């Protein structure tokens, strides 16, 4: 049995309080590919927590059978700070209450680490990856920490920055299963999308929000830009944010199936031994994240959805209506592009300007470099 469990204390908690990050490790560092999986970075997104528990059971079974070829690091509750933010009976785990900062934003760009080892890099891409991973790990460990949330970010990044595969489990309000990953990582990540049954895949090299997955994968193409063009530096980390449907999709059957899909994916990537079987067909094409159209409410009122999740709608189609509860007036919310309705608002009362649905278009709607992710 190779599992080890570590409780990492977070620094800078208030006097008399102490939070810890529990980490499960399987396999041996350096024995094969490393996979890092975390759930609940947005602490009020519960489906990932349940999937992580089923995944832990599967990893323990694989470990008992001697099938862990590489290394797996699993953090089932990646945000103990957010899990403790309960306001008047409601869990508020997306933003840190002390600062208003999104827990999945503001991760450090460690690309400058490449400059410290540039003289040691050569024409061997695999050796370059080894050197750069060591430099990234050192840079992550040395990140300055002044708050408890910064301590959390440093620990999570340190655990993941040298991995071959990084999976960040999230969910939307109401949504089909979908994922975000780097443009350069497609179509290499198509096996992840196919295995998990994603209905939508969104690509961006830089989203503008410094989320966790881009801190782990995007650093590789950012390092490449800082090094001489003749030095081979592959995109050595496949990082993805996997959105496990909606917040209410907390079900043992769904979670067990999702965890089984992730175990098969890890077997395809050589992290686990065993035959994963035939790869299911891909259910969607990847699209630029910049092509997503956000349908916004023109007025405040009662939100009535008119399009179901997974529907394909035409540009101009009414996907929802907002009903004024005082006058009874109805305001149409229309699709700005043709595409798949992949996410909807869960709250049935909205304010003017609120996003009520998201549609996957095909052509970019915003200029390169624009901030693409919702807060």
Image (cartoon, helix red, strand yellow):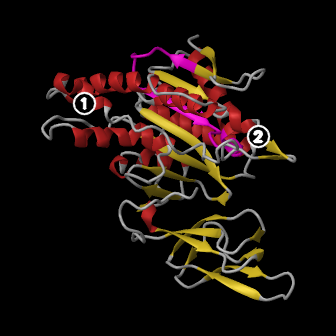
Which numbered circle lies on residue 62? Answer: none
Left or right relative to 78: residue 112: left
Q: Which residues are magenta?
A: 25-48
Sort mark 1 into few (<14), some (14-19) or many (20+) by Cα contacts within 10 Å: few
Question: Visible in this render: residue 35?
Answer: yes
Q: Residues within 10 Å of mark 2 (few under 14, many from 20)?
A: some
Nearer to me, 65 or 237 = 237
| Quarter location, residue 124 | top left
**Precedes in sequence: disc 2 or disc 1:** 2
Residue 95 point in image, percent of width and height: 66, 46
Question: Is residue 280 among what the camera can see?
Answer: no
The quadrant holding residue 7 is top right
Q: Residue at x 12, y 38 (%)?
A: 230
Q: Which residue is denoted by mark 1 in the rendering? A: 115
Asked if residue 44 lies left or right of residue 166, the reply is right
Q: Is residue 136 above or below residue 193?
A: above
Q: Is residue 300 magenta?
A: no
Label 1 element class: helix
The quarter of the image holding the C terminus is bottom right
Which residue lies at the image location 72% right of the left edge and 43% below the top edge? 253
Residue 76, position in %: x, y? 65, 31
Q: Which residue is mark 2?
A: 85
Position of 247 with respect to 125 (left or right) is right
User: CA–CA distance between discs 2 and 1?
Assistant: 40 Å
């Amino acid at each position: 049995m190779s599992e080890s469990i570590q409780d990492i204390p977070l620094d800078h908690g208030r006097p008399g309080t102490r939070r810890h990050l529990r980490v499960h490790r399987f396999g041996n560092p350096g024995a094969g590919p490393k996979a890092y999986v975390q759930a609940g970075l947005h602490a009020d997104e519960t489906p990932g927590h349940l999937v992580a528990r089923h995944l832990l059971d599967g990893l323990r079974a694989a470990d008992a059978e001697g099938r862990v070829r590489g290394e797996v690091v699993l953090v089932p509750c990646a945000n103990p700070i957010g899990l403790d933010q309960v306001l008047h009976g409601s869990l508020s785990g997306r933003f840190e209450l002390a600062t208003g900062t999104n827990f999945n934003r503001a991760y450090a760009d460690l690309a400058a680490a490449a400059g410290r080892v540039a003289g040691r890099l050569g024409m061997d891409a695999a050796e370059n990856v080894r050197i750069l991973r060591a430099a990234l790990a050192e840079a992550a460990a040395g990140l300055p920490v002044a708050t408890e949330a910064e301590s959390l970010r440093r620990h999570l990044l340190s655990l993941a920055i040298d991995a071959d595969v990084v999976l960040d489990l999230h969910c939307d309000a109401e949504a089909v299963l979908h994922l975000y990953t780097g443009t350069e990582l497609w179509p290499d990540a198509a096996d992840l999308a196919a295995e998990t049954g994603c209905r939508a895949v969104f690509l961006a090299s830089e989203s503008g929000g410094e989320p966790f997955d881009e801190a782990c994968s995007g650093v590789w193409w950012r390092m490449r830009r800082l090094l001489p063009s003749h030095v081979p530096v592959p995109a050595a980390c496949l990082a993805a944010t996997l959105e496990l449907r909606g917040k209410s999709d907390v079900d043992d059957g769904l979670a067990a199936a999702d965890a089984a899909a992730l175990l098969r994916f890890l077997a395809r990537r050589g992290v686990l031994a065993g035959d994963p079987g035939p790869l299911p067909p891909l259910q969607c094409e990847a699209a630029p994240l910049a092509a997503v159209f956000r349908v916004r409410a023109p007025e405040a009122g009662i939100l009535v959805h008119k399009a179901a999740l997974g529907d394909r709608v035409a540009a101009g189609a009414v996907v929802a209506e907002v009903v004024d509860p005082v006058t009874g007036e109805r305001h149409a919310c229309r699709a700005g592009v043709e595409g798949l309705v992949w996410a909807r608002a869960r709250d049935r009362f909205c304010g003017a300007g609120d996003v009520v649905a998201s549609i996957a278009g095909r052509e970019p709607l915003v200029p390169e470099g624009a901030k693409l992710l919702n807060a």
